[in-house]
Structures are given as C-alpha cells and as structure tokens.
Image: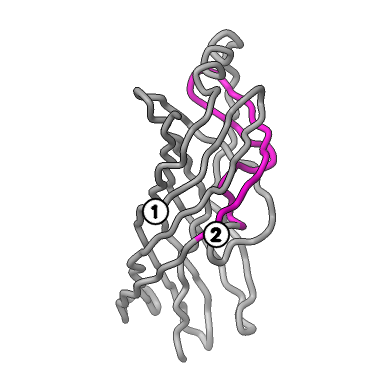
C-alpha cells in the first residue's frame, strides 16, 4: 500500500481559559496590553498523528515539525476589548519528520521540507482579559487557522497566556484536537497537537 505523507499544519489556536480571576488584576493587565504592537515573529512545535487499519494491518503515521516565522510584518492594536490587526504577514520553512509504523513496528522514516508565505491580512477581533496573564478571543484571534496552509475558513475561539517584558509581548497557546476523517475511503483517527508562541513589539 502506498503510504500518504501527512503534513502537520499549524493550527494556531487554542485553549479556552476557564478559571475565574479578580477584576482588578484583569483591568491592570488590560491597561498594560493596550496600544500598538508590531508582529515580530511566531514559533510553533507541532505533532500530527494519523491511525487507521487497512486489510488487517494497523498503520500509524506520526509527523512532527518545529519552525520560526520569517519576513514578518504588520501591527495589532489592542483597545477596549478589540484587537485590530493590519497587514499581518510572514513566511516559514519547516523540516517535517514522518515516522510510519505498521502493527507497532517502525517501517519508514522520511524528512521533507515545506515552505509557505502568508499574504498581508487584516482583521478585527473581540477579546477578554482574564486575570493578570490570560487573554481570550471568543471569535478567533488575529492569526487563525484559515491563514495557514491547509487551514479551514472556520473561525475558532482561542486563548493565550501572555507576559510583557520590556517592550515585548509574548502570547503562548497550546492545542490538542482529535477528529475522525475518511481519506481515500479509509476511516482515520487524527490527533493534532501544537504549541505556539507569538511575539509582538510595542510601538
């Protein structure tokens, strides 16, 4: 059977912040977040697992990648619960490592480079600051899965933990997404894991 190469797509989004925190810390954090920030870069570490059975054989494809974006541009303005992004753009090159297993035994290892670039994109997103270090975008953030290779147009709620050090804002998010898909007539269990960090520079 010819094996498929499953590329882990960057799924920038995220865990919903669920804990309650007091309003005073939220107001202080919201104030420190307010202003204009330049998109500096984004880092991502992804894992994509695809499991399926065909003709009695159990297959598992595990592909991983790590990358840091380049050719970054654009700005984000945080003000009164609204994040307005203008001309967010970037590119990336990643080495995708694919390991294929049959009935639990490693049968193949393959490395493939992929490159892509994102055209300038602008958006307006609502957000909520929770406590002193969390921000939640109920309608999706200024970088979404729809702006990445293989991403869908669906807008996803997203949550981040953030810190501000000097003039740099760091926003970190993690995701685990499980789905079942039928590909070439074969039902596959897909699990996607990703850790992302977005860096912004105060203007």
x 58%, y 55%: residue = 145
- Part of the protein shown in magenta: 118-146
Residue 59 magenta: no
Task: Judge from the rendering whether residue 26 lies leftward or rightward of residue 126; answer left or right.
Answer: left
Residue 148 image offset from top left, x and y in percent: 54, 60
* Of the two numbered discs 1 and 2 in the rendering, the one whose residue sits closer to the viewer: 2
State the residue position of label 2: 119
Q: Label 1, on which residue?
A: 69
Tell me which colouring the rendered structure shows.
one colour
Q: Residue most toward the bottom?
A: 1
Mark 1 packing: few (<14 Cα in 10 Å), some, or many (20+)? Answer: some
Secondary structure under badge 1? Answer: loop
SS category of the residue bearing label 2: strand
Q: Position of residue 178 (x, y in %)?
A: 57, 57
Q: Tell me the tag on residue 116.
A: none
Q: Picture coordinates of residue 8 (x, y %)?
A: 46, 64
Quadrant containing the C terminus in the rendered view = top left
Question: Do the residues bearing badges 1 and 2 touch, measured as CB atoms within 8 Å?
Answer: no
Observer-nearest of 54 and 44: 44
Q: Foreground residue, 72 or 147? A: 72
The residue drawn where x is 60% and y is 19% is 20
* Mark 1–mark 2 distance (CA, rounded to whole Å): 13 Å
């Amino acid at each position: 059977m010819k094996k498929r190469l499953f590329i882990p797509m960057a799924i920038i989004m995220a865990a919903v912040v669920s804990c309650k925190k007091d309003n005073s810390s939220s107001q202080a954090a919201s104030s420190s977040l307010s202003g204009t920030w330049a998109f500096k870069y984004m880092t991502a570490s992804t894992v994509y697992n695809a499991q399926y059975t065909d003709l009695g054989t159990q297959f598992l494809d595990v592909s991983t990648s790590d990358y840091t974006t380049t050719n970054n541009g654009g700005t984000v303005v945080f003000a009164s619960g609204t994040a307005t992004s203008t001309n967010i753009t970037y590119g990336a090159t990643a080495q995708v490592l694919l390991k294929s297993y049959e009935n639990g035994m490693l049968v193949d290892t393959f490395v493939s480079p992929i490159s892509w670039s994102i055209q300038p994109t602008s958006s307006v997103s609502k957000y909520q600051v929770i406590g002193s270090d969390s921000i939640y975008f109920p309608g999706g953030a200024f970088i979404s899965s729809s702006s990445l290779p293989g991403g869908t147009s669906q807008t996803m709620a997203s949550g981040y933990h953030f810190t501000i050090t000097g003039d740099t804002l760091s926003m970190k998010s993690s995701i685990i997404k499980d789905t079942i898909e039928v590909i070439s007539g074969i039902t596959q269990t897909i699990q996607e894991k990703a850790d992302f960090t977005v860096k912004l520079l105060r203007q």
